[in-house]
């Protein structure tokens, strides 16, 4: 048999083998992260005075979305002085934005003032003592109700940056996880709602055993030991808003969950309980657990919490940084603030996020939502 025929046969065999490869996810295994501990009171006070110390950026870095619009400064000569508040983790990023914007509009003065804490800045916004506040999470329900009680409408919250992937304290993405022996590899929002909530606004029947999620054998009749974060907490509020809230109705947690006041011990608890299920920020995965892919809509794609999926906003539990401002319905913002936001939501503005390397730049579909909020749509 000649060499050409042998080569053709080999290629044919390899091609057939390649074509027959099964579909499904490939799993990369990583060691748990170093255990984080709560900030000391001294660290908290230092953060309020000068901003929190930045973590070391991930070695991988996302691209800036080429679909974002380029920033073209308006022809109007803008002036004005505006001051507001900021979360301590945003001080460096906000300062970079102000500096870059000043290159385009040198007569606009933008500043943030101490103490640096998003919660305190929000209270100043409610008291009409601040022009804006940068907050590294969604506003608290009580803040929204207080604002509405005073002004008769909600504050305008505009997403201006992604959170981080897994930096402790810097708005890490969130994920659900199980014991490493558990064979399950994904959960849908409907299933999570049926497991964690008492309201079940997504329509599912209560789920209490692993067999109800399709597991067989020894797992079929085992109860799901559900670990969660006690309300109110920024982590649980985010999961509540993204998954338990549905159809315009606010979701409520089951009362019989294994609650922890803080997020720190959850990964360790699940790693030591064969039948456990929990959630936390990715920065707190300090024990060997199996991270689950998530399905937002029944029949949809399961997306894992990989760096790439979070950075490109394909993974649904990445978080966002918000610029919050008092914008009355039907009325524009002061031209300088509107122009600043137009800059931040542009390719050049998100390049500043990329250059800092801690937070993740918005993708165009997220920035478009911000522009729509700015326009009151």
Image (cartoon, grey):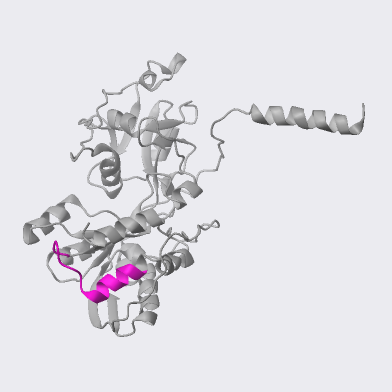
Nearest to the observer: residue 107 or residue 376: 376
Task: Tell me the quarter of the image containing the N terminus.
Answer: top right
Asked if the magenta segment contains residue 336, the reply would be yes
Nearest to the observer: residue 372 or residue 254: 372
Residue plotted at (18% across, 41% down)? 248
Image: 247 above or below 163: above
Residue plotted at (44% across, 49% down)? 310
Q: Please give the range of residues in magenta.
A: 327-343
Residue 128: % across, % down = 13, 69
Residue lying at the far right of the rendered structure: 2
Image: 304 above or below 13: below
323 left or right of 301 in image = left
Residue plotted at (35% across, 34% down)? 297
Residue 161: % across, % down = 37, 60
Residue 114 showing in the rendered view = no
Residue plotted at (32% across, 68% down)? 342
Task: Tell me the quarter of the image containing the C terminus.
Answer: bottom left
Residue 157: % across, % down = 24, 59
Q: Quadrant of residue 299?
A: top left
Residue 78 showing in the rendered view = yes
Image: 286 above or below 155: above
Q: Quadrant of residue 212?
A: top left
Residue 145: % across, % down = 12, 53
Asked if the magenta segment contains residue 191, the reply would be no
């Amino acid at each position: 048999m000649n060499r050409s025929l042998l080569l053709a046969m080999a290629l044919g065999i390899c091609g057939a083998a390649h074509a027959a490869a099964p579909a499904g996810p490939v799993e990369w295994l990583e060691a748990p992260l170093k255990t984080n501990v709560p900030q000391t009171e001294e660290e908290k006070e230092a953060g309020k005075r000068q901003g929190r110390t930045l973590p070391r950026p991930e070695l991988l870095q996302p691209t800036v979305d080429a679909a974002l619009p380029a920033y073209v400064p308006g022809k109007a000569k803008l002036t004005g002085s505006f001051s507001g508040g900021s979360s301590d983790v945003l001080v460096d990023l906000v300062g970079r934005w102000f500096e870059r914007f000043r290159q385009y509009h040198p007569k606009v003065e933008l500043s943030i003032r101490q103490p640096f804490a998003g919660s305190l800045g929000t209270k100043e916004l409610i008291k009409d003592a601040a022009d804006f506040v940068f907050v590294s999470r969604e506003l608290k329900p009580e803040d929204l109700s207080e604002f509405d009680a005073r002004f008769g409408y909600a504050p305008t919250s505009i997403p201006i940056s992604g959170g981080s992937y897994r930096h402790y304290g810097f708005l890490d993405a969130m994920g659900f996880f199980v014991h490493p022996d558990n064979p399950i590899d994904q959960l849908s929002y409907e299933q999570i709602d049926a497991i964690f909530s008492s309201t079940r606004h997504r329509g599912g029947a209560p789920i209490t055993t692993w067999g109800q999620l399709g597991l067989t054998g020894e797992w079929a009749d085992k109860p799901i030991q559900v670990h969660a974060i006690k309300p109110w907490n920024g982590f649980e509020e985010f999961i509540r808003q993204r998954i338990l809230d549905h159809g315009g109705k606010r979701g409520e947690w089951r009362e019989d969950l294994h609650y922890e006041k803080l997020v720190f011990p959850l990964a360790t608890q699940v790693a030591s309980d064969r039948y456990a299920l929990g959630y936390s920020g990715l920065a707190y995965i300090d024990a060997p657990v199996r991270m689950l892919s998530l399905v937002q809509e029944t029949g949809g794609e399961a997306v894992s919490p990989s760096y790439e999926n979070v950075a490109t906003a394909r993974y649904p539990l990445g978080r966002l940084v918000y610029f919050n401002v008092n914008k009355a319905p039907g009325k524009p913002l002061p031209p300088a603030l509107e122009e600043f936001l137009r800059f931040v939501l542009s390719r050049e503005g998100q390049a500043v996020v990329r250059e800092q390397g801690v937070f993740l730049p918005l993708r165009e579909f997220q920035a478009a939502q911000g522009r729509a909020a700015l326009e009151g749509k």
